Amino acid sequence: MRPRSLRLRALTALAGAVLAAATIVIPARTGGEAAVAEQTPGPILFGASVASAAELSGYESVAGKKIVGYRIYRIWGQRLFASWQLTARDNHHIPFLSLKARRSGGPISFSAIAGARPGSTLYADMVDQARQLKAYGGPVYFIFNHEVDATTSANSGGAAAFIAAWRTLHQVYQAQGATNVRWVWTLTAWAFTTGTAAAYYPGDAYVDGIAADGYNWYTCRSGGGSWQSFATVFDGERRFGLAHPTEKLMIMEFGSTEDPLRPGRKAAWFDAARETLRSPDWAQFSVVLSWNGRNDPNRRTGCLFDYASSASATRAWVDMRDDWFMSTWRVQ
């Protein structure tokens, strides 16, 4: 036997002993906590929100590595995929596609979607969407009407109507053979914190991933907010996931504002987020997508959640993507 083989066996035995010891010191848990605690935190798919091929390429230039997962937004009636997304598919990028129940002229009723029947315009729209998704030919993480709990969705209907619309879409897409679609139910992080999220849940049979959009707003929105860690912002989602231990947990948007009195505090926030995701209690999480656009100017909040708000924040964002733990293939 060669010395290299002996050394490898010795290292393997040592690693096994370390892992065994680590297992012994984990305190006993029950229910969903036990199921999650038994998992080993795995690599996280790191990505970003984008609006174009140029944005995606630009973020990759900053990161110095491929940004595999990307979040993109569509409204009802828009083509789901631009030509650049097909090129991105061939280069092994993975889309997280949000579709709002809204046309250019205004919101669409969830009840109307749920009640659509063959021969109606809405039903034809759903069939067309399903065919586009199937023709894409690769995995698509699909988000129907993200942040349904927010006031921006209030004119489409309430929780029961949303669930009915979600299930109808799921049924139509499945019937059309769009089996490459992974269904990611996405609310605000606040809905999980307050406990209102459960009312909107379509059920495990209709969901492949549970997700949240969440931010450390600090004082940029109301002027009186407290600084909140990544763990604080998303702990409600983590706890919700304990009741659904077979579901993947995902973060579809995240970011932090700067603290004007403490330069570098935002960078430390990003660094702490990485450490949080390594914790066994967060082992259900498999995707984090950063918000890299400037906040909607119509809201006039002036909140700059993206990595470009300071040099230190940019460095921390790059470090996040550069971390081996921020892998690219776990959700495949």
Image (cartoon, helix red, strand yellow):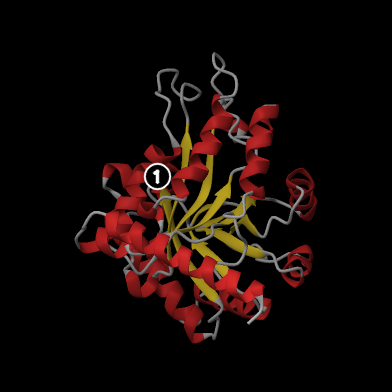
Residue 24, percent from left and from top: 28, 59
Q: What residue is disc 1 on?
A: 234
Q: Which of the pair 274/134 is nearer the observer?
A: 274
Residue 309, percent from left and from top: 66, 28
Q: Is residue 187 above or below residue 91?
A: above
Q: Quadrant of residue 150?
A: top left
Residue shown at the point (58%, 74%) measured from the top left: 6
Image side of residue 91 versus residue 17, left or right: right
Categorize mark 1 by other alpha carbons within 10 Å: few (<14), some (14-19), many (20+). Answer: many
Residue shown at the point (35%, 69%) measured from the top left: 246
Q: Is residue 33 above or below residue 268?
A: below
Quadrant of the drawing holding the N terminus: bottom right
Residue 39, percent from left and from top: 37, 64
The kind of residue on which mark 1 rests is: Phe
Q: Is residue 200 visible?
A: no
Q: Is residue 318 above or below residue 43?
A: above
Image side of residue 131 versus residue 120, left or right: right
Q: Secondary structure at mark 1?
A: helix
Q: Is residue 205 above or below residue 58?
A: below
